[in-house]
Image (cartoon, rainbow, N blue to C red):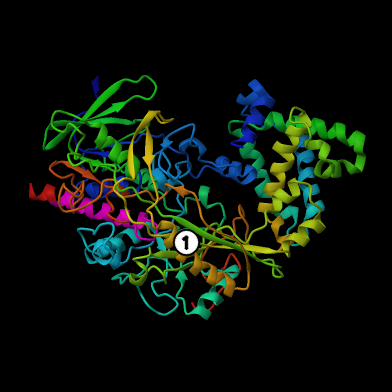
Amino acid sequence: MSNRDSNYQCVIVGSGVAGAVVAQRLLEADPKTSIAVIEAGPRVPLKDRRRWWDFVSTAENPYEKYHDLALGRENQSVGDETWVFQESRLMGRGGSTVHWGGWALRFKEEDFQTCSRTGRGADWPISYDELEPYYGLAEHLLGVSGKAEDSHGKVNPRRSSEYPLDAFPFVVADRPMIHAFENEGISYGHMPMARFRKCMTTGTCRYCPFGARFTAAYMWDAMEANPQYENLRMFPDSPCERLVCGDRRSVRAIEIRDPKSGDISRIEAEKFVIASGSYESPKLLQRSESQYWPSGIGNDFDLVGRFLISHPFLHVRAAFPSNANRWNQELDFPTLMSRHYDSPDEQPQGKLFLFKDRSRPSLDLASMMINGKRRVEINRASIGPMEFELQGFMEEFSNFDNRVTVGEGRNRAGMPQTKVNFSRNTDFRDRAATRLAIMERIVRIMGAKIAVSAVRTQRGDHAASTCRMGSSPADSVVDRNLQVHDVENLWICSNAVFPTGAAVNPTLTLTALATRLGDHLNGLRRAS
Amino acid sequence: MWHESQELLEQFVGTELQDTTDSLGDEQRRELWQLFVAIHDTWGSDAARPEEMDSRWREFIHEKCVHSPSYLPVYRLACRLFGQLRRVHGAQMYDYLFFDPEVSADPLTELYRVKKLVVDEFIRVYVSSGGFRAYGGKNYGGFVSGSRFRSQRPYRTFEGKQ
């Protein structure tokens, strides 16, 4: 056991967007703040031309070694529904924003009142109005391109600031779906995208050669290069073993395990912010057993890791018989979305957020050439059947039995593996069928022939609610300020604190919460 | 499927992976460029000429040669192999490389590896450098289409009522 550069004012576990925003807020308020950032994964090379060319010329995933391995090789899924870990998060400096799609949507007002409105799930202890100013700050931080008004001229959710960047225009291949929306009176809009400031529409968003898509790694680049922030330290390749309590009301240190030697070192601090996502945050609390917290920190009521949710992914694939104008998506992200069914009326069935597939219509010209197709065959294919997909995220209600716990063995980054016990709610299939019926109707109006209409295997990309926020330890793990109940110097900042997952992507809401937490911590410091 | 290219590369060049000097000779560059032009002649059109893609192709070759794992040994072997194939197939050499199933039949052969690591990668670079235009569209994965600002419209758009 050794001590590493103790003692810090703040330890942040996890270098994703939540950890980066909290650190930035603290350092902006006091540049001398001493912060240790503990990241289990390595630094991921970004804006690297060779890696970009490798991606372009081989079409192979540039982040494979930072992802979870496939089930059977890593992690355990033990519920009735298979839970897919692979490619659903990224373990490295910058966290999952290194590989994310950049969709940056606000939750709506009713998403904060799910239980009151439906009798299911939980309410948030904060309101949309309380978070609204932070949403604006988050949109500016991520560089979100968007348009506030939908096609009906409505702005929902209401907002006090404009998007910092103009929306990306619709691609021409959005046209048939837009016409179907209009025929049905369905409102639609532009997908808000965190494409930072200099998107060159390379179509290789997963590995942007220019750093145009926001990732928290660029925030760390700026902070680590700032000479004023001389007390900021980043510890990559440093999986956390457990938190060490000084007494029941405070954490004194964090233990880090060297992934190669297995040696344990300890870092002490005044405050601890766990920003490790919806798997690692509860697992760290669970592992931190002591005489003060025999079941793990904050786990006296056996709630840590429970209520796991993510978005069920619905898709309806269809085809037109021909593609006379040779349309293809031309971008690596969707431009068209609809929040028409992401509404209070739909909440009891599960709100539905619709978007056009980011990758269809498409024709993989290079693969056809590589496979020996002649020019005439490729020409024929380019005007042949045009496939597209209407996709949707459905809101799901949390279930006490769906849970994240510590799994068997360690993963490639040296962290304990993850076990997920996840089963669908009993009425899920019936509710999902009503959602798919909506989507099929839209596709039929387009005049296309449906080939597939289904719910995909559950992925963990938007995993949430495993340390949910609430008013008391009997029903939640953290309070409205994200502080673990009854522990004065420990906060959780991840999707884990979401009481509900709404129907849209979580990252903007997480960024808003992290901004708010940074301000809260600065307020505590001023008060003391 | 993970990193088939990398696995092939490692099997292929063995200890030569550490070679990070960009030292392709002029003749070897010409041979490789001829392959790129042949891809254009086979599948392309005047909508995008290979001369317009020259700087991108050169950057691609440079990056592949000077950074690890280096493709230098692969490119050198490809040039030798093309010389041999030209003696057998003459003007039909590229047809053989692009369309004959025999080329991809045996993963243990040098020909298979050169097809995967050189020919196929050049095809992807060609298509993403503008070759896609022969089949429609203003933008394609890997093509640097330009700024997103309204005046430039780097992809085909639908303005609609929005």
Residue sitting at 52 percent across and 42 percent down?
A48
Q: Badge 1 is on which residue? A: A392
Residue sitting at 75 percent across and 46 percent down?
A371
Dominant secondary structure of the residues highlighted in magenta in the image: helix
User: Does any portion of residue B46 appear in the rendered image?
Assistant: no
Q: Amino acid at mark 1?
A: Gly
Which quadrant of the structure image shows residue A192? bottom left
Q: Chain of mark 1?
A: A
Image quadrant occupied by the N terminus of chain A:
top left
Total labels: the figure holds 1
Q: Where are the magenta residues, as a range?
A: A501-523
Q: Nearer the viewer, residue A18 or A184?
A: A184
User: Does any portion of residue A366 appear in the rendered image?
Assistant: yes
Q: Position of residue A517 (x, y in %)?
A: 22, 51
Position of residue A431 in the picture relative to residue B2 (left or right): left
Position of residue A368 in the picture relative to residue A264 (left or right): right
Secondary structure state at the residue bearing disc 1: strand
